Amino acid sequence: MQKRPYNGAFTLVELLIVVAVLALLISILLPSIARARTLAKVAKAHAELRGITLAIAMYRQENRQEIPPTRFSCSSRTAYDLPVELMPYLPQGRKNNVDIVEMPDPFNPDDTYKYRAVGPAIMNEFTILENAATLWVPDGFPYAEAETGKYYNNPKTSPVRYAVWSMGPDPDADVFDIPGRLPVPTKYWLKNSSKAGVIVHLEDNNGQIHVSP
């Protein structure tokens, strides 16, 4: 019997098998790729937050151990912007016609990292309010956190001096049940198994820096 010549084309069954294998590989690889991208952003956030804490340390050395005030605004500025006092040490830019430290949050490029310190606050660029800036600190911070705690507005009594943070992969997640308590409680921190949480560097009243995972 004479054999039919092979024309090199795939049969329909072979084509379906290839498509099924490719679909399976993609379904396996996509979560890994997404996870790798998230980890890369987390690493970048930690590196840049570390740079901000170093800038705060340099500012403190030149300003009698004072740290920059917290900022609020009704219009031109986002609440808890990075302090413009750090502009000599960090990248500069402008937003809504005001000077800003231009360090975009890798998870939210349209916004910068956040900064919140206990003590004085500046409202709408000009109004200085004494002891208006607060941080909620859990009882037992930092080693035996309780569900209870309170807002501190006096730098002399607060267990935490300041915090800088990224809102992480999902700023609107349900994990932030009381947004006003961000970012000190560790229950709000981004952990290895969590899909939402803040990435934070904060300094306690002993000068020790605490870092989320």
Image (cartoon, helix red, strand yellow):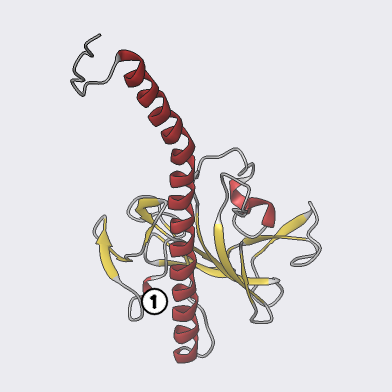
Identity of the residue furthest to the front in this view: 1
**10 Å neighbourhood of mark 1: few (<14), some, or many (≥20)?**
some
Residue 117 visible here = no
In the rendered image, the vertical position of residue 202 relative to residue 110, given as above or below: below
Give 186 or 117, whichever is nearer the viewer.
186
The C terminus - image quarter: bottom right
Q: Quadrant of residue 158?
A: bottom right
Give 74 or 1, whichever is nearer the viewer.
1
Callout 1 secondary element: helix
The N terminus - image quarter: top left
Q: Position of residue 156 (x, y in %)?
A: 68, 78
Identity of the residue furthest to the top in this view: 1
Residue at image position (47%, 80%) is 54
Left/right of residue 2 with respect to residue 42 in the rendered view: left
Q: Position of residue 20 (x, y in %)?
A: 41, 24
Q: Position of residue 162 (x, y in %)?
A: 57, 70
Give 152 or 204, whichever is nearer the viewer.
204
Residue at image position (44%, 57%) is 41
Left/right of residue 69 with respect to residue 8 in the rendered view: right
Q: Quadrant of residue 134?
A: bottom right
Which residue is tagged 1? 86
Say how many tags the image has.
1
